[in-house]
Amino acid sequence: MRFPFLHLGLCLGLAAGLFVSTVPAAPVVEDQARLSLDSVFSPELSRHGMVVSEEELASRVGAEILQQGGNAVDAAVAVGFALAVVLPEAGNLGGGGFMLVHLAEAKKTIAIDYRETAPAQARTDMYLDESGAVDKERLRYSHQSVAVPGTVAGLSHALARYGSMPLKQVIEPAVKLAEQGFVLKPAHIDTLKRTHEHFAQSEASHRIFLRPDGTDFEFGDRLVQKDLAWTLSQIRDHGPEAFYQGEIAERLVADMQAHDGLISREDLKNYRVVEREPVRGQYRGYEVASMPPPSSGGVHLIQLLNILEAYPIADLGLNSAESLHVMTEAMKLAYADRSKHLGDPDFVKVPLAGLASKAYAEKLRERISRNRATPSEKIQPGQPAKYESPQTTHFSVMDSKGNAVSNTYTLNFSYGTGITAQGTGILLNNQMDDFSAKPGEANAYGLIGDKANAIEPKKRPLSSMSPTIVFKDGKPYMVLGSPGGSTIITVVLQTLMNVLDHGLNIQAASSMPRIHHQWQPDLLRVEEGMSIDTVKLLKAKGHNVRYARPLGTTESILWDGKVFQGAADPRRQGGGAVGY
Ligand code: DON
């Protein structure tokens, strides 16, 4: 049985009732409370394998591949293609992402970087108008917003290297879903409505994502994507080359040329997937592997864990003001460092080892007061040791052999630019906004960047996506990740700490109210359901607290040594943990 979707308000209300903050620090969670919490939030269970994604239809596709004898990579690639159809707001062929693959037999974890790249014609100041201001419309909602897509190359690369099935077999369910259509759920209707204006400006999007009379789809309508079915069948029949050099490339480039876009035939032909070493850390005896630059996610996740490891988080209590205070202070320091030090490692030197070191965390910890919030304006990026040597969606898969895949990919905004390339059904990303278009100017997620993340031809924009695998005794223990722009890192951090520090099961850990601070703006966002007492205590320490919209949507698996526990985040209805 799938975890029954509880309305978010109910989940959070329950959580708020169970956890009341106390000062001074003392264990606040009685065993009885822990037991009832675990029974309210029960994960999906399976002995053989588990697939968790934001759309149950896609999770089912993955579980069927496992059942047919495929490994975690086969299933993950099938889910990746299926989500491009059934979760068009974030699943994609026209975007990019990151995949962490753990191979049990080889005892190896590989980080596959299929992030988009800036087109060769891109220039550092390309989005500035005559007055020197950033032209946000051109940056976010035009053919010039689009970076060279990496998804088709990334999924095909993973399958060819680490999968066991032919592309035809894993892509076929996606072709069928696009051709035959699927019934839209409230979550789809909601995001489609919110993108109406942008769809209306793109002839191809208008035709696909609005009803023929130009009105919005309603609950129960069927979304059929014939052009996308054609694109997927081209990839099925001719491989990824169809996308980067063949018929699909022709159509993409024609669409670019018709609308002042920058992506050329050469850009597509030259796109390369990069395999990287995951960034690694230790937290309370567990090993954490996550995505290295050009994502900032992994390194700051580990930096945060290093800082927080010295605090008695479990004793301070789940979502108590005391624990949230130190977590917030650590977040400010990490995001300040992000603004200065992080960028594409093929273009800038990222002090990765310094940022992820325990010694640097110790130095940063000295800057944290247990009693008072330090205003962000008093915090500057730190000086880690130099480098010693040279609507996004997440899904997780584990198979019975101990292989694991943690994948986050994105068009950036929900439906990216909202523009579909004519004749392809492919929604175009607006990943160029993840660059720092002007030093000190915030991007759509309020993130500030500098030279390290300036636009350069062929460079990859900095990301926060954090596909993560936690190991216990050398074996994958948790697989997790989330969408949420700048909040991804802190969402993954809290889900992980809810299990490792507070002993919650993976579903409860995914359901608890969350917080987020990113240094600038100096704002501590808390989700509804966080105890009002906790909020009062945080304010008394000097935090600028605001209740915020839901933070992130995790899709996680925990292997407890006997059983796979899958947890789809209740923040998005329609997600699915499917075991077999
Ligand atoms: O790579 C990044 O960090 C962003 N493009 C992710 C955007 C995102 O998570 C949007 N989803 N809610």
Image: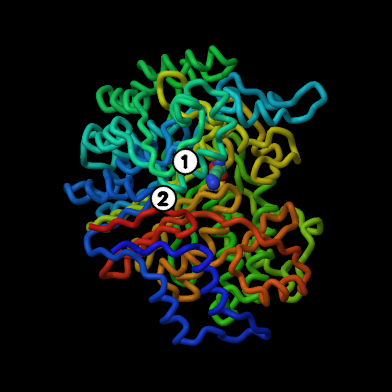
Q: Which residue is mark 1?
A: 90
Q: Element type at marker 2?
A: loop
Label 1 beta carbon within 8 A of ligand 1 = yes
Q: Amino acid at mark 1?
A: Ala
Q: Quadrant of residue 514?
A: bottom right
Is residue 103 shown above or below 163? below
- Residue 318 % position (x, y): 55, 75
Q: SS for tag 1?
A: loop
Q: Nearer the viewer, residue 356 or 132?
A: 132
Q: Amino acid at mark 2?
A: Glu
Q: Is residue 99 visible?
A: yes
The numbered dot on residue 411 is none
Q: Position of residue 485 (x, y in %)?
A: 57, 47
Q: Dividing the image into 4 quarters, which one contains the C terminus?
A: bottom left
Q: Which residue is mark 2?
A: 54
Going from the N terminus, do you reach mark 1 or mark 2 first? 2
Quarter of the render that holds ligand 1:
top right
Disc 1 vs disc 2: Cβ atoms closer than 8 Å? yes
Give the x, y percent position of residue 262: 57, 19
Give 231 or 268, whichever is nearer the viewer: 231
Q: How is the image coloured?
A: rainbow
Q: In which quadrant will I find the N terminus?
A: bottom left
